[in-house]
Image: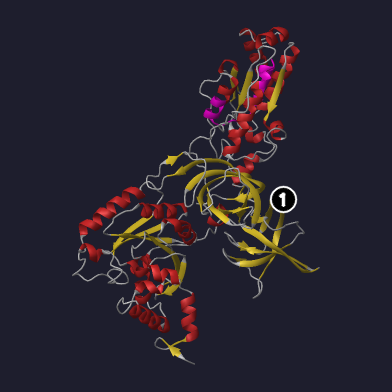
């Protein structure tokens, strides 16, 4: 048997190479920053070039009168790239060293090819951003860092190239490092490193520069940084997400669900739940061409069989019962527009997220981002390579996680419904508590619409009904007793000869708000609709009793603005978490404690108590009837009844 590497067999060598850690990284830089030259030199010095390819490059270099080797030709594979001396398309290259294996995505520098850069960065664990030492930090350099940040790349290496053209000046390098660091502070960059290089001469590319060139640089070379940076696992191994791509039924005795494990670890015998149906079962077998597995890891393509017959189809997802993704038709996302045809806010698009494809529409374009300053700007559409924050509504429910938590389930693409071209790539946003409190969605006034005056005035209705209509807004935690109080109060007002009507959270979601989910954005829209309905009831002379969690002070304040502060009465149901959990007949608090239910106010989402409520009800100290009587007496005292 042939021996290699001082006695190692070929099989042993291949097995050792297979077990090396793999690092995926992208490279980006402005036009003529020397990116292709740097990667070519890296490939050459790391022995990542075949002999016949090396001979071909040497021959091409002589024909182009560029000396013995033009290192850029190792990566610029397209004819147009070689002719123009630029990178146009994303080129993937593979090489390895004794320490690690590498897959590098060589991405274009032109602004018009920013979409290609985003494609290359989408699977990267590290990004190398080149800066020309003569030009300093350019807008395109900031754009590449911003996109790398959006893509969740945790490690950034800034390679300051062409140091030989600035006489290896430490001052030039220090200024670029200072300027770029100042911009990076505005972004969520976890690990930022700098290295001065000369791609043409190879200084600090694969090996450290000689003392005669940059003796002031005491750090590692670019290749040493790539070899030694700690990357850990690039996959989420906690949250099991198995999107079903295909249902395999070769015969009557076998029914399997094919797909790729997006994240988490899928084990034989595990209890799982199929979404969106919510049906439970256990993993019977994990089938592959090479035999059954006891477990499957992220990015493994397998076929899963279950112990029970469950109706599962393409686009559904298999998860663990106590660790579920978010589910809803509305998402907030950062969008990179990748089409030369501008975004049409009223256009028809498909959203493809994991294995599910559905029609969708834009609900709003909140703003676009100035890449140079990171300032938010008002916009009514996005152009090629522009980045904005959008709200999207899908026809089907999506199963997703925030992008920063799970790349696989937190990303999506948009497809033009007419041309079938991919037009945008998006990253779903995590709405943190520290994020801006969701506001009631602003309503655009249509110039063609005109508000008609009432034929019967409010005073006439008041005189006829003998009451001044109010809105009693009852807020409190889930299962605190809001609805019980609301219906008790409605009954008392009716007995006194008044007119009142309860707007209850569940009843509204079964009718007027049935299209809304439980995202922060949808909750805000839910409250806006309720406020508008309460205002109409008040205008008709009817007292509206609204029983809603409405956890944010700002949303309640905006509801008061819609209804009219003079007829808005806020009642706070002050109940402890223990009381609410005890009276919760839906198991919501238990699910929230287990982690399978997210965003339950008071548990894993905020609830802002009213600072000065009109009335307070403590169900642990007072009956609903007594509280309703107190409120009724207060209304009479104010002359409302």
In the rendered image, the vertical position of residue 627 relative to residue 312, given as above or below:
above
Please give left or right for residue 194 compared with residue 189 in the image: left
Q: Label 1: which residue?
A: 277
Q: Which residue lies furthest to the right in this view?
A: 252
Q: Which residue is drawn at 29% across and 55% down?
A: 136
Viewer can see residue 218? no
The percent coordinates of residue 25 (x first, y second) are 43, 64
The percent coordinates of residue 379 (x first, y second) are 49, 40
| Image quarter of the C terminus | top right
Name the foreground residue: 246 vs 34: 34
Q: Which residue is drawn at 64% across and 63% down?
A: 259
In the rendered image, the vertical position of residue 616 relative to residue 2, given as above or below:
above
- The residue segment tinted magenta is 536-558
In the rendered image, the vertical position of residue 616 relative to residue 199, given as above or below:
above
The percent coordinates of residue 557 (x first, y second) are 54, 25
The percent coordinates of residue 202 (x first, y second) are 29, 71
Other-residue count near label 1 (Cα within 10 Å), few / some / many at <14 / 14–19 / ≥20: few
Please give left or right for residue 226 compared with residue 406 in the image: left
Q: Regarding mark 1 in the picture, which secondary structure is present there? A: loop
Viewer can see residue 171? yes
In the image, residue 540 lies in the stretch drawn in magenta:
yes
Name the foreground residue: 522 vs 283: 522
């Amino acid at each position: 048997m042939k021996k290699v590497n001082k006695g190692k067999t070929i099989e042993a060598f291949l097995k050792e190479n297979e077990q090396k850690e793999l690092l995926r990284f992208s490279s980006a830089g402005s036009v003529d920053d020397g990116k292709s030259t740097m990667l070519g030199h890296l490939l050459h010095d790391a022995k990542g070039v075949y002999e016949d390819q090396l001979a071909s490059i040497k021959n091409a270099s002589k024909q182009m009168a560029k000396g013995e080797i033009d290192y850029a030709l190792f990566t610029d594979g397209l004819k147009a790239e070689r002719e123009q001396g630029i990178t146009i398309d994303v080129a993937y290259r593979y090489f390895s060293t004794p320490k690690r294996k590498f897959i590098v995505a060589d991405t274009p520098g032109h602004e018009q090819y920013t979409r290609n850069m985003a494609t290359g960065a989408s699977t990267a664990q590290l990004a190398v951003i080149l800066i020309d030492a003569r030009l300093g930090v350019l807008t395109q350099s900031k754009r590449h860092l911003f996109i790398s940040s959006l893509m969740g790349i945790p490690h950034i290496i800034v390679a300051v190239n062409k140091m030989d053209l600035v006489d290896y000046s430490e001052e030039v390098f220090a200024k670029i490092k200072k300027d770029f660091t100042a911009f990076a502070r505005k972004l969520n960059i976890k690990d930022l490193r700098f290295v001065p290089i000369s791609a043409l001469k190879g200084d600090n590319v694969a090996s450290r520069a000689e003392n005669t060139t940059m003796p002031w640089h005491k750090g590692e070379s670019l290749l040493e940084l790539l070899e030694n940076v700690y990357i850990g696992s690039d996959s989420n191994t906690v949250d099991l997400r198995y999107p079903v791509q295909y249902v395999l039924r070769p015969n009557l005795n076998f029914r399997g669900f094919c797909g790729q494990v997006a994240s988490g670890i899928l084990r034989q015998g595990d209890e799982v739940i199929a979404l969106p149906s919510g049906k439970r079962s256990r993993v019977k077998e994990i089938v592959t061409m090479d035999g059954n597995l006891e477990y499957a890891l992220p990015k493994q393509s397998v076929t899963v069989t279950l112990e029970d017959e469950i109706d599962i189809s393409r686009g559904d997802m298999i998860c663990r019962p106590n660790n579920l993704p978010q589910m809803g038709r509305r998402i907030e996302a950062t969008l990179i527009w990748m089409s030369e045809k501008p975004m049409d806010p009223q256009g028809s698009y498909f959203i493809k997220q994991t294995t599910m494809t559905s029609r969708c529409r834009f609900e709003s374009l909140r703003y676009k981002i100035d890449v140079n300053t990171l300032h938010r700007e008002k916009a009514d559409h996005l152009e090629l390579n522009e980045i904005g924050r959008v709200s999207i509504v899908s026809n089907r429910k999506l199963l997703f996680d925030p992008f920063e938590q799970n790349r696989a389930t937190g990303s999506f693409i948009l497809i033009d419904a007419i041309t079938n071209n991919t037009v945008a790539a998006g990253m779903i946003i995590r709405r943190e508590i520290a994020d801006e409190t969701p506001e009631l969605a602003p309503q655009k006034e249509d110039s063609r619409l005109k508000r008609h005056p009432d034929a019967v005035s409010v005073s006439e209705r008041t005189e006829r009904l003998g009451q001044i209509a109010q809105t009693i807004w009852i807020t409190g935690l889930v299962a605190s007793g809001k609805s019980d109080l609301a219906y008790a109060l409605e009954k008392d007002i009716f007995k006194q000869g008044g007119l009142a009507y309860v707007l209850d959270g569940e009843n509204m979601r079964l009718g007027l708000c049935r299209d809304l989910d439980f995202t922060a954005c949808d909750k805000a829209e839910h409250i806006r609709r309720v406020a508008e309905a309460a205002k109409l009831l008040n205008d008709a002379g009817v007292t509206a009793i609204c029983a809603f969690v409405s956890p944010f002070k700002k949303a309640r304040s905006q509801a008061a603005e819609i209804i009219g502060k003079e007829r808005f009465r806020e009642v706070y149901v002050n109940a402890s978490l223990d009381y609410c959990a005890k009276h919760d007949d839906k198991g919501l608090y238990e699910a929230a404690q287990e982690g399978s239910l997210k965003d339950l106010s008071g548990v894993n989402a905020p609830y802002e108590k009213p600072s000065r409520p009109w009335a307070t009800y403590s169900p642990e100290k007072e009956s609903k009837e007594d509280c309703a009587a107190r409120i009724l007496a207060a209304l009479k005292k104010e002359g409302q009844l």
